[in-house]
Amino acid sequence: MQHLYRQWQISAQHATSYRAKFTLATEVLNSDLSSYEIRKASRRVVRALEAVIGLPIASADVLRKAREHFGALTELLSSTEHPATGDDAQHVTASSADHQNIKAKLPP
C-alpha cells in the first residue's frame, strides 16, 4: 500500500495536463486502498472534469475548480501517514495536525 500511495504522489507531481489529473483522480477514486478522505478529494476532481474532459476546450471556471480540487488531492496524498518500511522509510510523513489543516482547506 505504501508503494501505491508513493506512486500516486509521484504521478500527481507530474500531472501537468487536465487529462492526466482526471486519469489519476479516477484511478485513486476506484481504488479500494485509498482512504475515505482521499476518495472524497478524488471524486471532486473527477466531478469537476468529467463533463469537459472529452471536449477540446473548457471554461476557465471549470478548470480553476478542477485545479483547486487537484491541489487539495495532491496535498492530501502528500500528507498521508503510512508505516514506513524499506525504501519508504526515507519519506517524511505528516502528523495528525497536518491532516486537519489539509482537511480544513478542502472545499465542501
Image: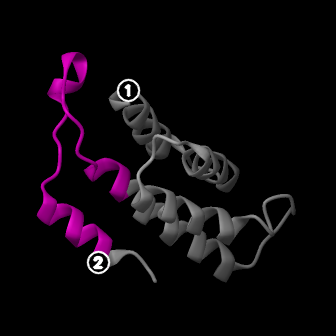
First in sequence: mark 2 vs mark 1: 1
Badge 1 element: helix
Q: Residue pushed farthest right?
A: 55
- Which span of residues is magenta-colored? 75-104
- The image position of residue 100, as x and y in percent, is 21, 70
At 29% from the left and 78% from the top, the residue drawn is 104
Marks 2 & 1, CB-CB < 8 Å contact: no
Q: Residues within 10 Å of mark 1 (few under 14, many from 20)?
A: few
Please state, as top left, top right, bottom left or bottom right, where the N terminus lies in the image.
top left
At 20% from the left and 16% from the top, the residue drawn is 86
In this rendering, is residue 100 above or below 2? below
Q: Residue pushed farthest top?
A: 86
In this rendering, is residue 7 above or below 21? above
The reply to whether the magenta stretch includes residue 103 is yes
- The image position of residue 78, as x and y in percent, is 31, 48
Left or right: residue 56 versus residue 33 is right
Residue under numbered circle 1: 3
Left or right: residue 46 versus residue 56 is left
Nearest the eye: 16 or 86: 86
Quadrant of residue 7 in the image? Answer: top left
Secondary structure character of the magenta stretch overall: helix
At 38% from the left and 26% from the top, the residue drawn is 3
Badge 2 element: helix
Residue under numbered circle 2: 104
Left or right: residue 93 versus residue 20 is left
